Amino acid sequence: MNELLKNHRQVISRIKAACTRNGRAVMPLLLAVSKKHKVDKIKYLTGIGQRDFGESYVQEAIKKIIELEQLSVDSSLIWHFIGPIQSNKAKQIATYFSWVHSVDRLKILGMLDQYRQSGMNIGAPLNVLLQLKIGDEASKSGASREEVLNMAAASQKMKNLMLRGVMCIPPRSTDFVVQSTYFRQAKDLYDELVKRYSSVDTLSMGMSNDLEAAIYSGSTMVRVGTDIFGVRG
Ligand SMILES: *Cc1c(COP(=O)(O)O)cnc(C)c1O
């Protein structure tokens, strides 16, 4: 577990250093991406102050969420769904999570709103990020800029959702300039949404290998898996 502590500290140092370099006073939130890692590790991280966790697979995530609730580790854990969303999973996602980062279709947006009403988190709206597709290659998920703007407008009528911003997963690159060019597209769209909607305050971008470029480009939330937990099994 010492390894986890060391890794977690190292990621926070990288975030702080990137903020200092870019003259940013407010640090982005660190989302620990725990997919494919065991509950023990999550439990350990909660002990050192990590509150926000990201999961990509619904079945696996719900098992962990329930297990941690039963251990009553900490009722203030915040669960983020960051994986591709199939419509037959929308109900479970709307019920168990506080945030969804990966909304890329109007149909899913409507389903999340509908199911949030009858979920166990009655009262709290589901925080929604719209996923922007970046890069021309045939990446599986994400919506075009125009589709994101349409979804954002539609979300204003959905009482059980709170539009918080934009998420993106750009094509993999090890080049800071290339990474920043991709992130710039998401930042531009985020700025447009901030102008239009007062609830928008979150730009989710940056992972283990590109969090510096993401912070340089204006990220407010980074999603880090490998560099905290180690390589996924
Ligand atoms: C797995 C995953 C991450 C974490 O990626 P690492 O490279 O392990 O840091 C971040 N965001 C999403 C959407 C993911 O699926």
Image (spheres, rainbow, N blue to C red):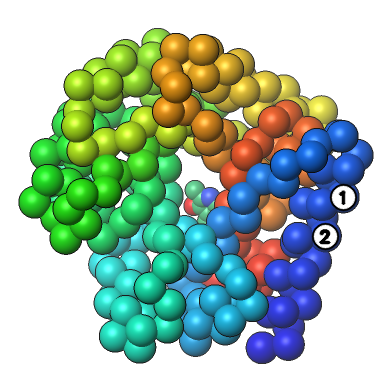
Question: In this view of the protein, which residue sits in the foreground, 110 or 136?
Answer: 110
> Could you tell me which quadrant the N terminus lies in?
bottom right
Residue at 55% from the left image edge and 39% from the top image edge = 204
- Is 61 placed left or right of 31 in the picture? left
Residue 209 visible in this rendered orientation of the protein: yes
Judging by the rendered image, the residue that carries numbered circle 2 is: 13
* Whole-percent x, y for residue 152 in the image: 34, 20
Q: Secondary structure at mark 2?
A: helix
Q: Please, what is the three-letter code of the amino acid marked with disc 2?
A: Ser
* Residues at marks 2 and 1, CA–CA distance in whole angstroms: 6 Å
Badge 2: how crowded within 10 Å, few (<14), some, or many (20+)? few
* Whole-percent x, y for residue 83 in the image: 39, 50
Residue at 42% from the left image edge and 68% from the top image edge = 76
Residue at 51% from the left image edge and 61% from the top image edge = 52
Question: In this view of the protein, which residue sits in the foreground, 171 or 204?
Answer: 204
Badge 1: how crowded within 10 Å, few (<14), some, or many (20+)? some
Residue at 27% from the left image edge and 24% from the top image edge = 155
Q: Are marks 2 and 1 in contact (CB under 8 Å)?
A: yes
Labels in figure, total: 2
Q: Secondary structure at mark 1?
A: helix
* Whole-percent x, y for residue 60 in the image: 32, 70
- Is 49 placed left or right of 51 in the picture? right
Residue 114 position by quadrant: top left
Judging by the rendered image, the residue that carries numbered circle 1 is: 17
Q: Quadrant of ligand 1?
A: bottom right
Residue 36 sits above or below residue 164 on the image: below
Residue 167 sits above or below residue 69 on the image: above
> Which mark, residue 194?
none
Residue 55 visible in this rendered orientation of the protein: no
Q: Please, what is the three-letter code of the amino acid marked with disc 1?
A: Ala
- Is 209 placed left or right of 149 in the picture? right
Q: Within 8 Å: ligand 1 and the Cβ of disc 1?
A: no
